[in-house]
Image: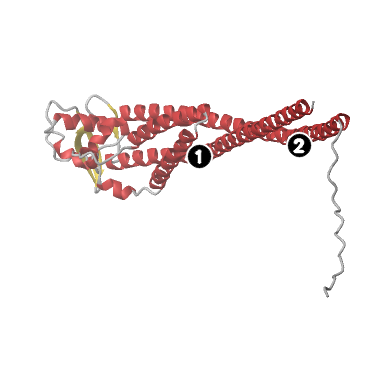
Amino acid sequence: MATEFPRTKEPIPTTRTPLPLSCRERKLVSSVKGIGQRSSVLSSGNSARKMAAVTAPNAQKMHFTKTEGEYNMKSIRFLLLMITTMFIIISGLMVVMGISVYSHYHSFSFFYESAKTGRFLTPSVLCIFLGLAMFIVSFFGFFGSLKQSTCMVNLYAFVLALILLIKLTIVILAFTMDTNLIMKYVDIPVWDYVNDPEISDEIDSLQTSLGCCGSNSYMDYVGMEFTEKHSTVVVSKEVDGDLVTLVIPSSCCVSNGDAFCTRMYSTSCKTALVNLLAQNAIVIGVLGVSVMFIQLLGIVFALLLARCIRKMKSERALMAWKIREQMIMARAAEESAKDNTLNIGHNEISVA
């Protein structure tokens, strides 16, 4: 006998197959989709407007910073131009002063032993060299500040620093000059006065200009055999309690008569030369200190100007990059909005 199993009920499907839509219903659905896409386009446009509104204050702030930086740079550049103009004037005066002193006292270098071998620089020659160096270097700062060249301004500051170190060394040597050491390098060949006409002319010029007599004293001429070619005078001096009559060159006499000297120079020419060199060194040292102060200001303003130029160029590059990025983002947003508009039109055409 066959057994019968109970029949199970089949599950009723819960999903229903969609019924075909009518033409009116399809148009209604497409219009709803179009409204949603238009709202997305409007929201993207509003976001672009919000982004522009947010970036506008930043752009204004950047423009303010740029203007303030340019204002500071113009002030520093004006001060640097003033200092550079002062350098040009001072360097010209140094060259003129050095040339005038050299032309007036160049014959005195004949009596410096080191000058004969080319190892001695007189203060006038140093003044000329430093003046020319400052005159040439000043144009780097002048044109560098006008052209806003960081390289030229930095080079100007570097060379000014080198000249400042050289001047500092010269000033220290000028104020710590040892006259006894310089005395060893001074050689006045009085013993060749009667033998060499060139030496006699140089010694006469030295004694007349500096108001001195002899290398160490007027006693250097004792016992010399003067000839008719030499201009001499007779003077009476008391030596060790005795009245001695001496024949000396007329350039040693302050005031003389026909052949007799009433008053003569008592200073030795070595001492006069060393004193002259020391006086010139002190004057050059004082001028060097004053010029060094102005030169230090020039170095500081040159470095500040170079820093301002670099900062301004960096801000300009950053602003250009941000503007480029904003233009790219705006163009991308515009292209996406156009694509969405084209898709909406295509969907409407396909639905229709």
Horizontally, is 261 left or right of 168 in the view?
left
Horizontally, is 121 left or right of 78 in the view?
left
Disc 1: which residue: 299
Q: Residue 285: where, in percent of width, then height? A: 43, 41
Residue at horizontal 75%, vertical 28%? 350
Residue 42, located in which quarter of the rendered image? top right
Residue type marked 2: Val
Foreground of the two, 201 or 170: 170
- The mark that comes first in sequence, 2 or 1, is 2
Residue type marked 1: Ile
Q: Please rate how many residues cluster around mark 2, counting C-alpha atoms within 10 Å: few if below 14, some from 14 to 19, many from 20.
A: few
Horizontally, is 220 left or right of 179 in the view?
left
Q: Quadrant of the C terminus?
A: top right
Residue 165, located in which quarter of the rendered image? top left
Q: Residue 59: where, in percent of width, then height? A: 70, 33
Q: Which mark is residue 54?
A: 2
Q: Is residue 261 visible?
A: no
Foreground of the two, 338 or 115: 338
Q: Quadrant of the N terminus?
A: bottom right
Q: Residue 83: where, in percent of width, then height? A: 53, 32
Residue ranking furthest to the bottom:
1
Horizontally, is 103 left or right of 148 in the view?
left
Q: Please rate how many residues cluster around mark 1, counting C-alpha atoms within 10 Å: few if below 14, some from 14 to 19, many from 20.
A: many
Q: Assign a secondary structure to mark 1.
A: helix
Residue 190, located in which quarter of the rendered image? top left
Residue ranking furthest to the front:
1
Q: Are marks 2 and 1 in contact (CB under 8 Å)?
A: no
